[in-house]
Structures are given as structure tokens and as C-alpha cells.
Amino acid sequence: MSLTITGLSKTYPNGVQALKNISLTIGNHMFGLLGPNGAGKSTLMRTIATLQEPDSGTIFLDGIDVLKEKNAVRQTLGYLPQEFGVYPKLNAVDMLSHLAVMKGITQAGERKDMVDTLLRQTNLWDFRKKALGTYSGGMKQRFGIAQALLGKPRLIIVDEPTAGLDPAERNRFLNLLSSIGRDITVILSTHIVEDVRELCPRMAIISAGELLLEGAPQETLKALQGKIWSKVVVSDDELRALESELRVISSHLIAGQHEIRVYADGSPGDGFRPVDASLEDVYFLNLANPAVPQPVH
């Protein structure tokens, strides 16, 4: 399966340009769309999901014109938006059955089998009769994946699915996504670098509506090897001085002291040591300055 996005742009009535000539090709795998809040990720996801129109550009899904053949796209699409609402007093079985009917699965036997299978797949079987309003955040997200899988879609879009989940629930959810992504295309839109690093063989970074980078995570890391340096900074004054002199990618507090990571072709000076590049380095460096080494496609 192939999703091809070409020259996609969108400006809202308030003047915010959410997408600026975005072009991407996404194959049959888990694809990570990484960017900060307000980068344009949700606008892109809603456009692919046929929920809004761009100002210009095209999207094709296996030869289907997404912008013109919306009903055909919806038959093969599963979508978990960032804000996913449920009827809090309904249980999981009744809610999934209702959504299945809306998706055109009208045969009672087929619908029951599908609902039962999805509840087992998402580890919600033991809670199937409980009201959805009593579910934890992680359980609601797993239910969201269950409804997205109704009708056996070939493309699933999940928008910021792990935001707000505790570590155990996030782990459970990522394992579920990983198992799903072996068989169909999943677009994972997130601002959490670890989600992409753990799941996605290919990724893109967007910010302020622009595509900054596209490639395999490992390829992006190779482009930075030997160019990332770390140092523990004792004082705030030293930190500010280094930030004014060097290309500081990020800083983290460790036992009350700042550990900074710097991008440089050679040693930036005394006290710096070379360290392995991380996907977080790729992310922050591209956000700060897109003119950095890009992966070879």
C-alpha cells in the first residue's frame, strides 16, 4: 500500500498557515510523524482522514484520490483522533457494535465476531461490560484503536495517542500499535520522540507547517555520528555563554547541574566529550536549524 502526498498546503481563516507545500510518500509500515504542538500534524492527519480540505495539493491512496473519493477512502481507513469521545454510560461491546453498524457491518453474526476479536486483541475483553466512563486513559486509547480497526482497514491514523498516559499504559499501548503495524500501514503522529524511536522504521519531522526531514531513524542518526558533544555545565552563566557561542541542541538537569549537548564538526573545547547521537538530537537540531545533514534516501 502507498500513500502519496504532493504539494499539500492549508491556511486557516485566521491567517495561520498550517501546512506549507508538504510532500511525502508513506509505504506499508509504521510511519512516525514527529513535531511539536502546533506543527501542523493534526491538520495533515485530518486532511488524510477526509475531515477537512486543503487549499492545494493532492493525496492518493493506492490510486484512490483521497480528496475526491472520500467514501472509498473511509471504507479502508481507521482513525484515532487526538480527542476521542465516547458515550460514558455505554459498555465497550455496545459501543463497538454501534460503531460497526455505522461503518456498514450490518450482519449480526459477523459484527459480534469482529467486536469480540477486537476486544481480545486490545486486551479489553475482561472489561467489555464495564461503562466506558470508568476506563483509565490507557484503556480508552486501546478502545480507540479497537474502533479504528473496525472493518479491517488498510490504513490507520493515530494522533498523539500516548499523550497523558502513565509509563505502564504507554508501554501497553505501544506494544499494541507495534503488533498492528506488522500487517497494515499505521501513521503515528506525535511530539514524543521515544514513540517514534521505538516503533517506526521511517519518520518525518515537521514544524510550523514545513517538512524538515524524512527518512529512516537509523539513517538520520548516521548523519550526526561524530558531531554530537556533551558537557556538564556548573553555572547558569557558563550555560548562557556556551549557548551564545555554540550550537547547543538541548540541555538537561542532572543532580542540579546542566548537561548540554552540542552539534559541532570537531571538539567544541575543554570538558566536552563525544557521545552517540540520539533521535532526540535529530529532532531538536532540525527544529532549531533545518540546515543540518540529511539522510540519504
Image: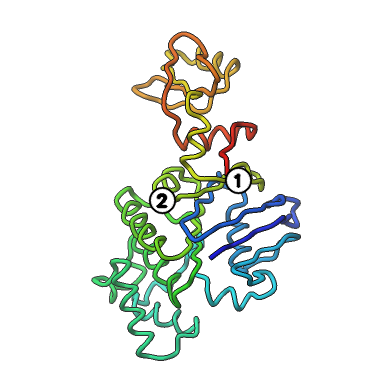
Q: Residues within 10 Å of mark 2 (few under 14, many from 20)?
A: many
Instruction: Classify residue 127 as left or right of residue 252.
Output: left
* Secondary-structure class at tag 1: strand
Q: Is residue 248 above or below residue 127?
A: above
Q: Nearer the viewer, residue 27 or 84?
A: 27
Q: Which residue is mark 2?
A: 199
Percent x, y of residue 286: 58, 35
Percent x, y of residue 266: 53, 16
Q: Is residue 178 above or below residue 292?
A: below
Q: Residue at x 51, y 62 (%)?
A: 157
Q: Which residue is mark 1?
A: 206
Quadrant containing the C terminus in the rendered view:
top right
Q: How many marks?
A: 2
Q: Nearer the viewer, residue 42 or 61?
A: 61
Q: CA distance from mark 1 to mark 2?
A: 18 Å
Q: Residues within 10 Å of mark 1 (few under 14, many from 20)?
A: many
Instruction: Give, as a three-letter code, the residue at label 1.
Output: Ile
